[in-house]
Amino acid sequence: MKALAELLKLANEIQVLDIGAAAINEAPVYRTLIDAGMARLNAIEGDERQISSLRAMYGERATIFSDFVYDGSRAQVHFCAPESGMTSLLEPRLESLRFFNGFEKFGAVSQVADVSTCRVDDLVELPNIDFLKMDVQGAELRILQNSTSKLASCLAVQTEVSFFPLYHGQPSFGEMDVWMRANGFVPHCFLDVKRWSIAPTIFNDNFRVPGNQLLEADIVYLRDPLRIDALTDESLKKFVAISHACFRSVDLCVHLLLALERRSALPAGTYERYVREIAARSANA
C-alpha cells in the first residue's frame, strides 16, 4: 500500500462509511486502507453490544455513530444473538427461516425495541462518502434511498443482497440492482455468494455444508467506469486506491490510471509502473 500511496499522492483521506459495522468473523475489505492511513472510517452501528469491539479495533482512526439509520421514522429493532448477525429493523420471516437448516435458531428474536431512526443524509457530522459498505439485514434499499446527498460522490458500494429474503419486506437482489443502476452504479464483482442447505437435508452431518439453494451475496457496485469524465482527478485517484486495496481489480485500476494519464493528472507510464509492481509482487509471493 505504501507504493500505491506514493504513486497516487492523494490530497485527502478516502472517506469510508460502514453501516452495520460489526465485523463478525471477517475483516472488512477496506481494512488495509485504514491501516495504511489512506482512509478514515465512519462506522454506523446502532447495536450497542457491538460498539466496544469497534472502538478497540480502530481507535482514533474511526468516527462511530451509534444510530439506527433507515428513513427517519419510528421503527422496531428485532434483536437476535450478537454473533448471529441477524439483528434487524425488519421482522424475521419465520417460514423462510424454517426453510433453511439452522436459521430458525439464528433468527430467534430475544427482544423487540422501539427506536427512532435517522436518515444518513441527516447526519450533519458525516462527510461525503467515497466507499460505502452495508450489512443491515434487509434495510439496505431504504437506507440508500435516504442517503443520496451523502453518496453523491460515492465511487463504490459493497452491499449484501438477498436471493431468498429472510425478513418481511426485504427487497430482492433484482430490486436492489434496478435501484443501483438507476443511480449510476453497475455491478462489478461478487465478494461472496452464500448457498445453504434446505431443511431437513443435512450433508456430511454438518448443517452448514451448502446445497444448491442461493441465499445471499456480497456484491460490489461501481460508479459506471464508462461515465468517469465528470469525476475529479482526486476522485479518480481514490477510485484506483479503493479498486486495488478492496477488490484487487487490477484491470479496473489500469483503466482508471490511463484516464488520469490522459488528463496529465499522473505522469505518462504510471499504469505500466503499476503493472510491473503487481507482476513483481506476484512473482515473489
Image: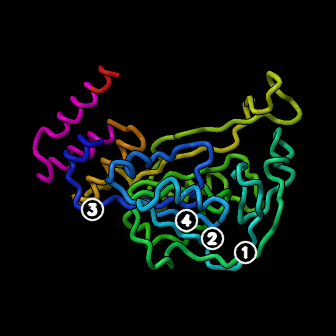
Q: Position of residue 124 (x, y in %)?
A: 45, 79
> Which residue position is annotated with label 2?
68
| First in residue order: circle 1 vs circle 3 | 3
Query: Which residue lies at the image location 21% right of the left edge and 58% below the top edge?
Result: 233
Q: Position of residue 169 (x, y in %)?
A: 74, 62
Q: Nearer the viewer, mark 1 or mark 3?
A: 3
| First in residue order: circle 2 vs circle 3 | 3
> Which residue position is annotated with label 3?
12
| First in residue order: circle 4 vs circle 2 | 4
Q: Nearer the viewer, mark 2 or mark 1?
A: 2
Query: Under tag 1, what secondary structure?
Result: strand
- Res 44 label: 4
Majority SS type along the magenta span: helix
The answer to the question of whether label 2 and label 1 lie on touching residues, with beta carbons closer than 8 A, is: yes
| First in residue order: circle 4 vs circle 1 | 4
What residue span does the magenta drawing correspond to? 251-280
Query: Which residue lies at the image location 44% right of the left edge and 72% below the top edge?
Result: 126
* Circle 2 Cα neighbour tier, 10 Å, few/some/many (<14 / 14–19 / ≥20): many
Amino acid type, callout 1:
Ala
Q: In screen coordinates, is 49 left or right of 236?
A: right
Query: Under tag 2, what secondary structure?
Result: loop
> Which residue position is annotated with label 1?
75
Query: Under tag 4, what secondary structure?
Result: strand
